[in-house]
Image (cartoon, helix red, strand yellow):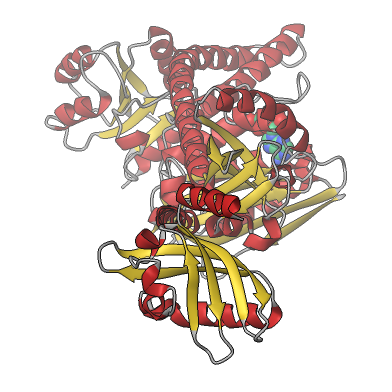
Amino acid sequence: MAQSRVLLENLARLVPGVIYQYRLYPDGRSAFPYSSPGMNDIYEVTPEEVREDATPVFGRLHPDDYDNVASAIGESARTLQTFYCEFRVVLPRQGLRWRWSQAHPERTEDGGTLWHGIISDITERKRADEALQVSNQRYRNLFDQANEGLVVMTTQGQIAEVNQAFAEMHGYSVEELSGKDIQYLDARHERALEDRAPIIQRLQNGEVVRFDVEHIHKDGHIFPLSVTTSLINLGGQSLWLAFHQDISARRQAEAEKATLEAQLQQAQKMESVGRLAGGVAHDFNNMLSVILGHTELALEQVSPGQPLHVNLMKIFKAATRSAELTRQLLAFARQQTITPRALDLNEMVEGLLELLRPLIGEDIDLKWHPAADLWSVKMDPSQIDQILTNLLVNARDALSDVGKITLETGNTTFDEGYCAEHRGFVPGEYVRLDVSDDGCGMDKETLSHLFEPFFTTKELGKGTGLGLSTVYGIVKQNNGFINVYSEPGEGSRFSIYLPRHAGKAAQAGTSDAAAAAPGQETILLVEDELAILELAATILERQGYTVLAAPTPGEAIHLAARHPGPIHLLLTDMIMPGMNGRDLAKSLLAGNPHLKSLFMSGYTAGAIGHHGVLDADLSFIQKPFSINDLAAKVRETLDRE
Ligand code: ADP
Ligand code: MG
């Protein structure tokens, strides 16, 4: 017995805290019949002080924990279950401390309870717990409130936790996602697994890894995300913490930028091709005038019965066809000389449809929807002919025998927002002409070359590839825009936008020249291309005119000064070295106030007016011209009031 007492005393000194016996008497009194010296630390009382009466110990309990301790004791006494409690004490020297106690109860003979137990100091553990709780709370707040989508998952990809932002980004609730495999959200399941291994490898090397993924939203749409991820260690477990940012907006901005760049490149390409085409067409035009004119002259001298006549006719036809091609090239190069006037597009289309219907064929359903109250445009009517003819012919070619072509007009206003997304579009009011068909449609490749001259997908002899380049040039020359919508097999829609003209449309009327009456007036002819000078002089002299031919403006001024009689008409090339036709006319007018002028040109290069727009009261003839064209235009100019 004495031995075990010694053992107990030694043990009691070794145990951190206090070993005790606590006795509860039936009358409610309690006492610590035995307590080890640790009592001095734990409650700052001596074992002697509490041997008879436990009250001093209860006086040390934190007021908020008193009831807890009392009821735990009561519970243990009643049930004889092990007493266990964590509680605070307030001590004179140590202040607020945490205590933990566990004790085993037994019933005494008098009906009271006796416990053998231990109390120890758990203040340090409690403080660490608290600190951990605070830090956990901070982490939680960060996690929950972050704008970025956060996920914690196992290295196998099983989602442990997601935050609100992540769940919302994907259209799910937080609960729906936890426990799921992250692969469930990945738009490319198989890739996701393959990709994971190297990423985990890098993460394990301590790297922060960034990559882009595509996830599936709950509603089914796929969206791009940027992921930044690192390996974290939570409670001894290696986890994958990933920040997700929705980058749809960024992606869209990048795509728009790429589109704009492509549009710019396309515009620049068209511009340089146009310059090239214009240059070639100009020289070619002069040559064609000569070929055409001389062929016509020769034809008049060869009777239709002779074999030579057939050859000459063939030359004439080929040259006429070439002249048509050059005209289209010039149109594309925006160097077609035009006489715009206010027009009602509906009226124009209606008139043209009558002419063009036979071209379309019976089996094609041609629908025409003119808009009411259509604004007017200011354009050269012949350019509308060209636009419509080309678009209709293309639509017809896109249909295999049967199908539908729809023509439609309308008023359209482009705002700043639209123009910001469509390079080259300028805000304002436009008259729209739509030509749509339900034919073969076009693929991306065709669409990207559509307006280039000589781009055609049609077989040799069927297409020239000049139709749409002509349309393009005309629309550009008139400060308009073209929009094309087409998909393979789904048909096409070409929308032409022409700037609204504020004035009212004039009555449409054509001034087709009949065979010209002969004349006897005097004409001063100026042209630096000698072949043309010679040709025109021959034509005009045959018509009965007196022709003063000059190869340069200087020569013309000399000739005019020396000529004794009146000069009725100046027929001059527009662009010549030294002086342009218009300035020549001005200087001649001083000596000949009644002099009329007729200008010839194959192209304009800005000398006639802005973008080749000619003043409506100027007489002009486009090269190459036929004998009849020239004779008629000369007569018309001379007869003008
Ligand atoms: P062409 O008609 O002589 O081939 P265009 O410049 O008029 O030249 O047209 C160029 C190309 O654009 C055509 O060869 C065709 O591939 C395509 N295209 C034009 N309009 C349409 C249309 N309405 N439907 C399908 N493809 C079209
Ligand atoms: Mg065509």
* Above or below: residue 416 compared with residue 616: below
Q: Is residue 119 visible?
A: yes
| Residue at screen point 38% across, 54% down | 416
* Above or below: residue 309 compared with residue 161: above
From this viewpoint, which residue is outermost toward the front?
A: 2
Nearest the viewer among 247 and 330 is 247
Q: Looking at the rendering, which quadrant does residue 484 occupy?
A: top right
| Residue at screen point 72% across, 52% down | 179
Q: Looking at the rendering, which quadrant does residue 349 occupy?
A: bottom right
Q: How far from the left and from the top, in percent, is residue 529?
A: 37, 10
Q: How far from the left and from the top, in percent, is residue 465?
A: 65, 25
From this viewpoint, which residue is outermost toward the bottom?
A: 27
From this viewpoint, which residue is outermost toward the left?
A: 590
What number of labels is visible?
0
* Above or below: residue 307 compared with residue 285: above
Residue 421 horizontal side relative to residue 466, left or right: left
Nearest the viewer among 291 and 565 is 291
Nearest the viewer among 511 and 322 is 322
